[in-house]
Image (cartoon, grey):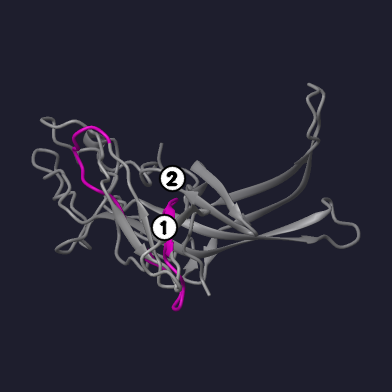
């Protein structure tokens, strides 16, 4: 599925009665829409310019209902899927495009509604950051040969940064689709470092990293991890504890 909502997002909050009974009820308390950001109507905060193969903008805001996760406070992470393929342009690639994989950071402010409102609360979603996903090593992209298309490699690729993209010919039939992440280390504001490890079968892609483009002064970290702290009084002794996931937040 692609970004069929083309930048339209409807968010619902419900309050439920936490009880083992099968008759527990759910009550709708607020709804809201997200159709724009500080970058403009139907635009995310990726900073991308230009258009995709189907003519839609590369910074299209949409499809974020594909997955929403609560992080804490008023902050949520929302992910679109592989990109907008609801606009027919080339059935040989299932109308998929070189939409760079990303997730969106949202704040959802809940306030009491005024007298006479249909719902007791008003929900105001705001997009605060867009994080693009990339690999430090080369990925497999389709050449477009025989499909009437150019290369599927995003124009934003640089040496040491290769973006994940959603075109369906981005694969190598001689490799499997496993993705392997061996180690990632991200500095925090306090100077400690955050490390995450994971592994899987041999890869068709590469280790994944994140590149956050957000309002100036924002923090840009996005890994669930274990952080190591070293005591100032005992520099040779380190302790570690699990921390909640860190995310990019606009400031």
Q: CA distance from mark 2 to mark 1?
A: 9 Å
191 left or right, relative to 179: right
Tell me where residue 155 sits by quadrant. Answer: bottom left
Any part of residue 210 in sight: no
Left/right of residue 21 with respect to residue 183 in the rendered view: right
Per the image, the residue denoted by label 1 is 60
Q: Is residue 157 visible?
A: yes
Q: With respect to residue 28, does 77 lie above or below?
A: below
- Quadrant of the rendering where the N terminus is positioned: top left
**Of label 2 and label 1, which has the lower sequence position?**
2
Which image quarter: residue 188?
bottom left
- Give me the residue at 36% from left, 43% from top: 82
User: What are the residue bounds of the magenta stretch?
Assistant: 200-229
Residue 186: say if magenta.
no
Residue pictured at 63% horizontal, 49% vertical: 11
Tell me residue 224's x, y (percent). Answer: 45, 51
Neighbour tally class for label 2: few under 14, some 14-19, many 20 plus, Cα within 10 Å: many
Residue 80 against residue 113 in the figure, above or below? above
Q: Which mark is residue 3?
A: 2
Residue 20: name its quadrant: top right
Q: Secondary structure at mark 2?
A: loop
Q: Residues within 10 Å of mark 1 (few under 14, many from 20)?
A: many
């Amino acid at each position: 599925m692609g970004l069929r909502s083309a930048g339209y997002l409807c968010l619902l909050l419900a309050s439920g009665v936490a009880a083992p009974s099968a008759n527990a009820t759910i009550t709708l308390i607020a709804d809201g829409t997200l159709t724009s950001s500080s970058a403009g109507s139907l635009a995310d905060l990726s900073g991308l310019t230009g258009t995709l193969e189907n003519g839609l903008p590369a910074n299209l805001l949409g499809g974020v209902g594909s997955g929403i996760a609560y992080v804490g406070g008023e902050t949520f992470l929302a992910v679109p899927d592989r990109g907008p393929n609801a606009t027919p342009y080339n059935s040989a690639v299932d109308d998929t495009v070189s939409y760079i994989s990303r997730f969106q950071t949202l704040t959802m402010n809940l306030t009491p509604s005024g007298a006479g409102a249909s719902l007791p609360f008003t929900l105001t979603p705001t997009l605060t950051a867009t994080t693009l996903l990339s690999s430090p090593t080369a990925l497999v992209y389709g050449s477009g040969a025989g499909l009437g298309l150019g290369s599927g490699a995003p124009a934003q690729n640089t040496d040491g940064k290769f973006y994940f993209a959603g075109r369906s010919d981005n694969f190598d039939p001689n490799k499997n689709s496993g993705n392997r992440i061996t180690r990632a280390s991200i500095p925090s504001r306090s100077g400690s470092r955050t490390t995450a490890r994971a592994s899987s079968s041999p890869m068709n892609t590469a280790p994944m990293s994140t590149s956050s483009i957000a309002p100036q002064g924002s923090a840009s970290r996005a890994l669930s991890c274990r952080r190591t702290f070293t005591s100032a009084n005992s520099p040779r002794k380190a302790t570690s504890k699990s921390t909640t996931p860190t995310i990019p937040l606009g400031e």
